[in-house]
Amino acid sequence: MPQVCLNIGAGSKPIEGYESIDHKNGKEGMPLKHADGSVDEIYASHVLEHFSHKDISSVVNHWATKLAPGGRLRIAVPDFEWICDNYRDGKPINVQGYVMGGHIDGDDSHHSIFDREELTELMVNAGLERVGTFQAEHDDCTQLDVSLNLQGFKPVKRLTEIGKTVALLSAPRFGPTIHMRCAIHAFSLLKIPYRVMQGVYWNQVLSSVIEEELKKDTEFIIMVDFDSVFDVQDVMELCRLMRAFPDADAICPMQMKRSDDVPLFGMPRT
């Protein structure tokens, strides 16, 4: 069966193998006429910024709903952080055009701004996994320096079963460290319950709490040490690997030596 690939806001440059949706600003990309779970790839290059900032969450959620399991959503938008950095450094960039649009006609105006963190959060909230950058492959705005290019994949299975996965965070006796904030944010975003325990050694609290969880219906336990940094992408990758290797007793993320930046062991991202 041939793949169903959509190019939203195709403009005057259609992509071979893609169905062109709307030749201007992509507004016909919401709603899509395609059935839920029927599309293999949605490609939206510099389209999302043309939607109101009040609607962008609904738009991304709608696109993700149309993806088949394993399907890919690619979104490119102007990178507001890149714009701000270059403006602050006095670089000769087209700030007005990047932020507000080219205004070459009534449709060429921007209504939303994005940085990597916000776009990542939108895609994660839409249920996508393995969210990360992609290299420009087509002759369009994705090749611009200002372009933030992110892609995410529709899980083949649900990311985690609510109640089946729990996170345990070990904190020193003086309390949680600042490193743990990013992990707590990630678990909250992914709706994974977490517990913060005081005691960083196995015989203090960790072993007993793990045994307690194993007696429940818990399928996966994510352990976070007090000096580790876990973001949303790390947690999503751990969940993906847990599903991919259900017989594994433990999956270890990348750990760095304290003296240098050489990893002791790694967790591949594919």
Image: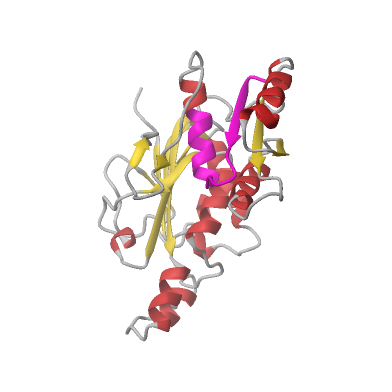
Question: How many marks overall?
Answer: 0
In percent of the image, x 50 and y 32: which residue is there?
Answer: 238
Q: Is 132 included in the stretch rendered in magenta?
A: no
In percent of the image, x 29 and y 39: which residue is there?
Answer: 17
Residue 71, percent across and down? 44, 33
62, above or below 12, in the image: above
The quadrant in which the C terminus is found is top left
Relative depth, front residue between 200 and 197? 200
Task: Tell whether 260 sits left or right of 84.
Answer: left
Relative depth, front residue between 201 and 132? 201
Relative depth, front residue between 174 and 1? 174
> Visible in this render: residue 101?
no
> Visible in this render: residue 236?
yes
218, above or below 153, in the image: above
In percent of the image, x 55 and y 58: which residue is there?
Answer: 118
Task: Tell whether 102 sits left or right of 30.
Answer: left
53, above or below 234, in the image: below
Relative depth, front residue between 64 and 130? 130
Residue 2, percent across and down? 34, 27
Residue 156, percent across and down? 50, 26
Locate residue 226: give its quadrant: top right
Q: Is 231 included in the stretch rendered in magenta?
A: yes
249, above or below 25, in the image: above
Residue 108, percent across and down? 46, 72
Q: How is the image coloured?
A: secondary structure
Q: Which residues are magenta?
A: 218-240
Locate residue 268: give its quadrant: top left
The quadrant in which the N terminus is found is top left
In percent of the image, x 69 and y 19: which residue is there?
Answer: 211
